[in-house]
């Protein structure tokens, strides 16, 4: 239940991103073209999704080897809000312009995104209706 609530809150927060962010879902941003490039970008790293009241993080998703997806929360040793597995991630499919990453969250919610490098330290995760503007932190842990 907590995971479903978390996913619903995250999805709601992402819909409210500023429209200026939508420029990242096409040129001049560069789409991640291959499975190898997407895996290198994500595996072992943390995707940092800022909340609307930055610098607080809405999500800090660790992309572990083998496709495990973990929410860092307040860290593995925290007594109340420790790091928790929230689902899985996979790289697949191409539409001739690049590949996609799919997120399957515990509880049944799934999202598929094309990923673009905005060239300014941010990436845009884009679906047909949503753009999620993120920073990708090298390695696991807090953003």
Image: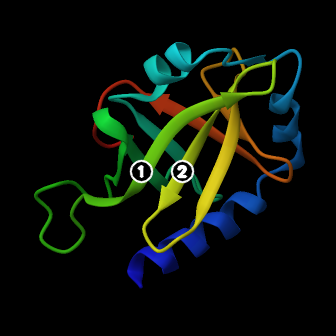
In percent of width and height, residue 23 lies at 88, 31
Q: In this view, does 121 lie above or below 114?
A: above
Location of residue 126 by image quarter? top right
Q: Mark 1 points at which residue?
A: 88
Question: In the drawing, what numbered circle is on residue 65?
Answer: none
In the image, what residue occupies the spot 89% across and 47% down? 19
- The reply to whether the C-beta atoms of the residues labelled 1 and 2 are less than 8 Å apart is yes
Q: In this view, does 92 lie above or below 84?
A: above
> Does residue 64 appear in the picture of this structure?
no
- Residue in the image at 46% along x and 44% along y: 89
* Render colour scheme: rainbow
The residue where tag 2 is placed is 103
The crowd level at tag 2 (other Cα within 10 Å; few <14, some 14-19, many 20+) is: many
Say above or below: 136 vs 112.
Answer: above
Real-space Cα separation, disc 1 to disc 2, in angstroms? 6 Å
- Given residues 7 and 56, the one toward you in this image is 7
């Amino acid at each position: 239940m907590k995971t479903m609530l978390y996913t619903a809150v995250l999805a709601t927060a992402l819909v409210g991103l500023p429209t200026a962010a939508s420029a990242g879902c096409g040129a001049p941003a560069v789409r991640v073209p291959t499975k190898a490039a997407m895996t290198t970008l994500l595996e072992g790293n943390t995707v940092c999704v800022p909340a609307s009241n930055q610098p607080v993080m809405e999500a800090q998703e660790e992309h572990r080897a083998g496709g495990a997806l973990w929410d860092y929360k307040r860290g593995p040793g925290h007594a109340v809000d420790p790091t928790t597995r929230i689902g899985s991630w996979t790289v697949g499919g191409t539409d001739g312009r690049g590949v996609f990453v799919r997120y399957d969250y515990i509880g049944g919610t799934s999202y598929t995104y094309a990923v673009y490098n905005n060239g300014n330290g941010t990436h845009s995760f884009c679906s047909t209706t949503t753009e999620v503007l993120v920073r990708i932190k090298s390695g696991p842990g807090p953003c």
